[in-house]
Structure formats: C-alpha cells, structure tokens
Image (tube, coloured by chain):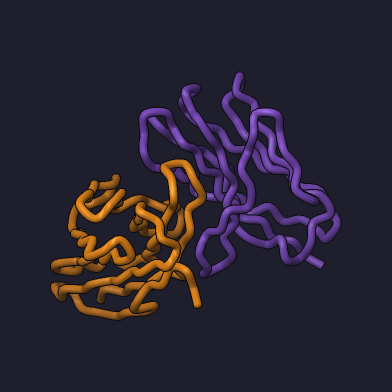
Chain colours: A orange, B purple
Amino acid sequence: DADVTQTPRNRITKTGKRIMLECSQTKGHDRMYWYRQDPGLGLRLIYYSFDVKDINKGEISDGYSVSRQAQAKFSLSLESAIPNQTALYFCATSGTATGELFFGEGSRLTVL
Amino acid sequence: RKEVEQDPGPFNVPEGATVAFNCTYSNSASQSFFWYRQDCRKEPKLLMSVYSSGNEDGRFTAQLNRASQYISLLIRDSKLSDSATYLCVVNYVGYSTLTFGKGTMLLVSP
C-alpha cells in the first residue's frame, strides 16, 4: 500500500459544487502539504500544516480551505468549484522542513 | 524574492548520450537543494540531494555553484527510462517550505 493515499484519484464536477480531496499517510510525519500542478506552471503550494493545530496558507490559497483532522489526515476543500481549479492536486508529507517530500499519486480534478 | 528557474525543454537525446540541466535560484541565502524526478502523470519523487561538494549517484551527478547561484544535474549514458521531467527544488533561508522550479522535460529516444 502507498504511504500517502489520496482520494478520489479522478473527479469531474460542475461549477459551484463543493469538492473535498482527502489525504492520509502512514509515514508518521507531522508535516503535510497540498499542491496543485498545472501545465507550464509547475507545482504551487496551496496550504500546509506542521501539526494538527497548525494550518498555513501557501502561495495560492484563495478558493481553497483545509482541515487537519489528525496527524495522518489532511483534506482539501473547494467550497464552490470553478473551471480554473481544474488541475492535478498532490498531497505530500515530510518529516522535517527541508527533508524529502513524499507525494501521493495525485487527484485529477476537472471542473466543467 | 524566491524563484527557481529551469529551461523547460524538452531535451531530446538519443540513448547513451550525456545530458545536463541547469537550474538558477534567486537568493544566495539558500540552505539546501534537491533534484526530483516526475514521470508523466505520476507524482514527483526525490532523485537526489545536492551537496556543496557535489555528489554522484551512479549515472547521475549533481553540482552546486553558490557563486553563480545555480545547480546542475548531469546524466551519463542516458536510458529510455530516464525520460521524465526533472524538478529543481530549493530551500530558501527563512522559509519553511520548499520552492519548486517548473521542471525540465527529458526525452530519450532509441
């Protein structure tokens, strides 16, 4: 089984719908991250959390929210999805600030 | 200002070729550097860290030039399986998260 699991792996939805992407990890890491990847734009950080009570905005947090339900779980929500949120979303974990990032397999979201 | 610049490519090379990528970063106060590899439609994975003295892992060599603020990745004897996007990653001093470049695509052909 993967150390970092994302669900759903693929989702097609309509504008205005609420969407939640979930991430769970078995690595025992405190640090968890949500990135989105768009062609030509690379990976951009949406939110990150360094422990259960810590939530931080990344460079593109507008339109997104997160919840850190437990050390192992970090979910990303789009309250009202819009087409320019169509992207590949990655969850990642790390044991330290500069340590290796371990990514989930990604969640491909399409907003029509 | 924290930026990581990479040539997007693609770099098209035949099997067996040697290819090198450069990556420039914007702040001399940078702590650590990495190369990640991302296969098409897959997640990024750490390829290697980059140390000040340079480091080698099999066919892969990473080097850091602090004076000119760039890091490089050299791949010798390219294999078809090396085809991927290579992401340059920098940890800037004072920032608690890593900064990713947009990646350089490598295509190795038979």
The structure residue drawn at horizontal position 28% and vertical position 52%, both measured from the top left corner, is A51
For residue B3, which quarter of the picture?
top left
The structure residue drawn at horizontal position 60% and vertical position 23%, both measured from the top left corner, is B66
Residue B106: give x, y in percent of width and height.
66, 56
Q: Is residue A24 above or below residue B29?
A: below
Residue placed most toward the observer, A100 or B8: A100
- Say left or right for B53 vs B5: right
Residue B104: give x, y in percent of width and height.
59, 50
**As drawn, which residue projects farthest toward the front?**
A28
Residue B84: give x, y in percent of width and height.
63, 60
Q: Is residue A13 above or below residue A32?
A: below
The structure residue drawn at horizontal position 32% and vertical position 79%, both measured from the top left corner, is A11
For residue A76, which quarter of the picture?
bottom left
Residue B28: give x, y in percent of width and height.
50, 22
Q: Is residue B33 above or below residue A32?
A: above
The structure residue drawn at horizontal position 55% and vertical position 33%, both measured from the top left corner, is B24
Residue placed most toward the observer, A71 or A94: A71
